[in-house]
Image: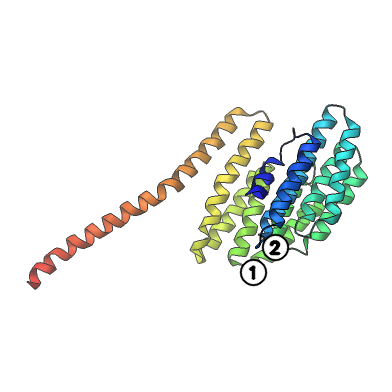
Amino acid sequence: AAANIGAILLRRADLLPQSADGLFALADESYKAQKVRDPRIGHDLLVARGRGLLNSAQTRIERGLRQQAVNLTGQLDTMTRIAPESSAPVLLGFNQQVSLMMGNTGGARASLENALNRLGKLPLPQQAAALRSLAEGDGVYQDNTVQNTLSALTAMAEKRGGAEYAQVLFEVGLMHAKNGNEVALRLVQQKLQDAIKSTPELAVYDEKLRGMAEVALAWKARKAGNPAAVELHLRQAASLVSGVLDAPARSKAADAASASNASAAAGPVASEGK
């Protein structure tokens, strides 16, 4: 529990460095004390710590506290060097963003290329998730190397098919949504629909993507100063969530109606048998 809570709180940009250090130590200790460790929690904890350092560095740069930002960047560098392969590409993405904020374009490019080179060591869905995180950096989504990596990853996942392909499409679709590319998002959703035709159980990825994509598009519209688009996307997200929540009730009603119809149809037959 402490590890999960720490992973949430560590994202905050307003934590004092001492508080963040203590919280991370407590959460990390809690995670390591578990008899059966869930690698996902360990990954989430490291990524949350890295994002917290990124947010804190950005806040201090904006306030003109450059030396404090440099110290935080050093902590992020150290974390990245010792991070496991599953977390390293995402942390390198944070390094890339901080380097740009500090005006170090060469360092930013090196971090991005290092991250892309290390993606291949991960399972395809993790590669897609890490690539989505990398694409949050300024100019990364539009980068030709990133787009080529994205195309190659999607093609490889398509050959494998099944849940692995659907997971990759989910991450790729969400990446497009977070960058405001609705055309690319709709193409990914169409691919997901095509996959669902042969494997209906993949529909869960489509439902998840539609809801999260609308929220991401609303956030992008808010940054662009388009309140009408924000309201539109949030309404669509709310409608999707409502539909998912109402689905069990509709299913029960349909089952009840089906049972009632079956009983009515069986009535005369039962009478004839008496």
Q: Nearer the viewer, residue 162 or 82?
A: 82
Q: What residue do we see at 65% from left, 53% from top?
A: 171
**Image x and y of residue 70, in percent:** 90, 38
**Image x and y of residue 176, in percent:** 67, 47
Give the residue number, with chain letter if any, for mark 2.
124
Q: What residue do we see at 28% from left, 55% from top?
A: 256
Q: Nearer the viewer, mark 1 or mark 2?
A: 2
Q: Nearer the viewer, residue 13 or 267?
A: 13
- Circle 2 sits in a helix, a strand or a loop, which is it? helix
**Which image quarter: residue 119?**
bottom right
**Label 2: how many residues lie within 10 Å, few (<14), some (14-19) or many (20+)?**
many
Give the residue number, with chain letter if any, for mark 1.
160
Identity of the amino acid at label 2?
A: Leu
Q: Nearer the viewer, residue 241 or 194?
A: 241
**Image x and y of residue 261, in percent:** 22, 59
Residue 145 left/right relative to 240: right
- Is residue 181 visible in the rendered image? The answer is no
Indicate the quadrant containing the C terminus: top left, top right, bottom left or bottom right.
bottom left
Number of numbered markers: 2
Mark 1 in CB contact with mark 2 (< 8 angstroms): yes
